Amino acid sequence: MSTAEPILLTPGPLTTSARTRQAMMVDWGSWDDRFNQLTASLCEQLLAIINGGASHHCVPLQGSGTFAVEAAIGTLVPRDGKVLVLINGAYGKRLAKICEVLGRSFSTFETAEDEPTTAADVDRLLHADPAITHIALIHCETSTGILNPLPEIAHVIAQHGKRLIIDAMSSFGALPIDAQQVPFDALIAASGKCLEGVPGMGFVFARKEALASAAGNSHSLAMDLFDQHSYMAKTGQWRFTPPTHVVAALHEALLQYNEEGGLPARHQRYANNCQVLLEDMAALGLRSFLPAAIQAPIIVTFHAPKDPRYQFKEFYERVKAKGFILYPGKLTQVETFRVGCIGHVNQAEMHAAVAAVAEVLREMEVLEI
Ligand SMILES: *Cc1c(COP(=O)(O)O)cnc(C)c1O
């Protein structure tokens, strides 16, 4: 295995196919009809994944995923709105930070990093504070890999007549979400995660009525999704310079997504990756942080070996030299590392990655295996 091109077992950027990378070898004019068609086709295919064509608009936005999250909050939460932010990890905390920076009134509800928010929690919180207009939820909290019960929470919120904003960045495309079953005002994802495109653009599925009434909410010109959508609807073009190569790569990645069998096939491949990873690591004596019932097949957090000879930095560098990029842990209380199940990889790569981990731990004399 060449060390020049390691396999990324990270939650984005992640390993992409040669075909997806090849699609970036063309320079597109942003005014060109063919590029506008590419964007339109992209939005249509993205909407189809959530069965949202009738109810939602797809608004693409330049930048990383966080740009799209910030744009969604800034555009869809009115300046006199109040957001309840549900937190069980770093990305939930980031949502609260966005509300703070944008000057939106908000409150937070935080559970432990291995404890999903429940619909009963949300029901209680909404009864207690009628000022809340919007609820912001992370679907799969990538800082651990925990899955929050989106459908149950969404229904409670709808019963209260409140609005839901979902950061589904690391689950969209792999875990099923049906916009006709799960009510939401906004669902946010990006090019470089489970769709296996390259990073560089996010997109927001915004409920049509919610977007139509969002004019003037945004604090920002460039991050205004109402404006971005209006301009695109009128002209077929992106409002400012589009990430042309990223769009082309994502379009090509979506062709492969559909050839593979769409969401069910993508979900199954990641679930298989996750299972191989958990089993092979368990055989080395490495335990996962989350119980299986709340573990999404996206990224797995492992407890670091309890051996003074283990240092993440050295472990990381040695595993990298064998061709695999792992990810540091993101927990404050316990020493962990993370391994992604997503990207253009399958069970063979997962077996090989854990074999590399085993060799490295043996070299570091951390494990007797
Ligand atoms: C990746 C990710 C984001 C966006 O992160 P960026 O670094 O801005 O791309 C947001 N939320 C979740 C849950 C994520 O996994």
Image: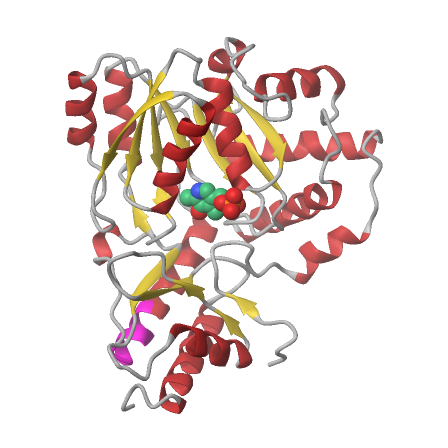
Towards the viewer: 7 or 297: 7
The answer to whether residue 252 is visible is: yes
> Which image quadrant for residue 151?
top left
In the displayed structure, would residue 187 be above or below residue 349? above
Q: What quarter of the picture does the C terminus occupy?
A: bottom left
Residue 355, placed above or below residue 328: below
Image x and y of residue 291, in percent: 21, 58
Which stretch is magenta? 278-285
Q: Position of residue 223 (x, y in %)?
A: 59, 26
Residue visible at 57% across and 27% down in the picture: 58
Is 27 located above or below residue 75 in the figure? below
In the rendered image, residue 280 lying in the magenta stretch gets the answer yes
Q: Say which residue appears at 67% left-offset and 33% top-offset.
A: 41
Q: Is residue 220 left or right of residue 245?
A: left
Labels in figure, total:
0
- The kind of secondary structure the magenta stretch mainly shows is helix
- Percent position of residue 281, x then y: 31, 74
Side of 271 where 294 appears, left or right: left
Please identify the quarter of the rendering in which residue 171 is found: top left
- x 29%, y 13%: residue: 161
- Could you tell me residue 140's position as x and y percent? 36, 45
Relative vertical location of residue 314 with respect to residue 193 in this rendering, above or below: below
User: Does residue 223 appear left or right of residue 330 in this picture?
Assistant: right
Q: Is residue 50 magenta?
A: no
Quadrant location of the N terminus in the rendered image: bottom right
